Image (cartoon, grey):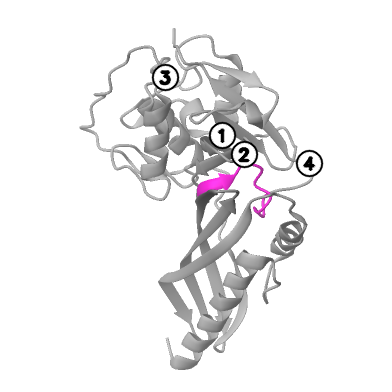
Amino acid sequence: MNNLVRKRLAAHFQQLAEWKAKGIDAKLLTPEEKKVTQRIKKQTRKAKLVKVHVDATPYQIITTGPDSHIDYSLNVSKLFRFGDDFYLEETNEIRQIVLKHNKIMSDQEKHQNDEIDVKKQGRSTHKQTLERTGTYNRLKAVQYAERWWNDYNPDYPEFTDNCTNFISQCLHAGGAPMHGVPVRDQGWWWRGENWSYSWAVAHSLRWYLSGSTKGLTAKEVERAEELRPGDIICYDFDGSGRWDHNAIVVRKDNERQPLVNAQTANSRNRFWKYEDSTAWTENIKYKFFAIHDQFS
């Protein structure tokens, strides 16, 4: 990478920082990202943005003739003040820059395919050592979400779209009992190199939580304010009826609104509505699930 490209990338990353911080238009934004910009400007939350830090780390460069593709990790940290309370929101995006003759032509988030593919199997020797008391330990579920929101526990498999696998791991860390082995379309479970659809697929977990009467169970509630840390929010971004994403509540802000952790894209203390996501549409639907404190 020559000095000219380095300077252009540095200037570009600075523009991205301004965009993330203040909703100021950066060059090369996609139409979806421009919509995010407009939503940022219209936000009426009482939480005030105090400081933003952006760190861009290239990890792969592929050059073919005059063209180069740079894959990089964009880490964004936002410090918010809400009354006398402060909290740090963090996100990690995988993005790709396309250069032609050393000029930046595009920069956009790399989206995963809809298919759930295994990137890495978990440790085959992993044993289920968690004590199952029939009680949901919300603290342990949240602690797990805080530890692994931007990393991958080698004891479990890792998927190209890892959001639901991550949520299942959080629930499991909280003591949620599995059942249904080895039938993949029944129950909620994971065993070595096999798992139920509800363990790893967002759409399947949403419907499992709606109907389960055994093992891991939950109550659907009407409002996000009714949720507690350790509860789950499901997202249908375009309102199509196909549920795309799940997140776990890790804390509440001063207005009792949930802040969530999730993967794909990796996020910590993110405001639950996801209005800052390019996946958000005006047709978005949410489902709010309060995990039962006692399991049968």
Q: Which amino acid does label 2 sit on?
A: Asp
Pointer 1 residue: 202
Q: Distance between the residues labelled 1 and 4?
A: 18 Å
Q: Which amino acid does label 1 sit on?
A: Ala
- Which of the two marks, 2 or 4, is nearer to us in this view? 4
Residue 266 left/right relative to 224: left
Task: Name the mark on residue 136.
Answer: 3
Indicate the secondary structure of the residue bearing disc 2.
loop
Magenta part of the chain: 268-279
Q: Residue at x 42, y 86 (%)?
A: 1
Indicate the secondary structure of the residue bearing disc 4.
loop
Q: Which of marks 1 and 4 is nearer the N terminus?
A: 1
Please say if the residues under marks 2 and 1 sit with CB atoms less than 8 Å apart: yes
For the residue carrying disc 4, how many other residues have a C-alpha within 10 Å: few (<14), some (14-19), or many (20+)? Answer: few
Q: Which of marks 3 and 1 is nearer the N terminus?
A: 3
Task: Name the mark on residue 244.
Answer: 2
Q: Distance between the residues labelled 3 and 1?
A: 21 Å
Q: x, y percentage for residue 80? A: 56, 55
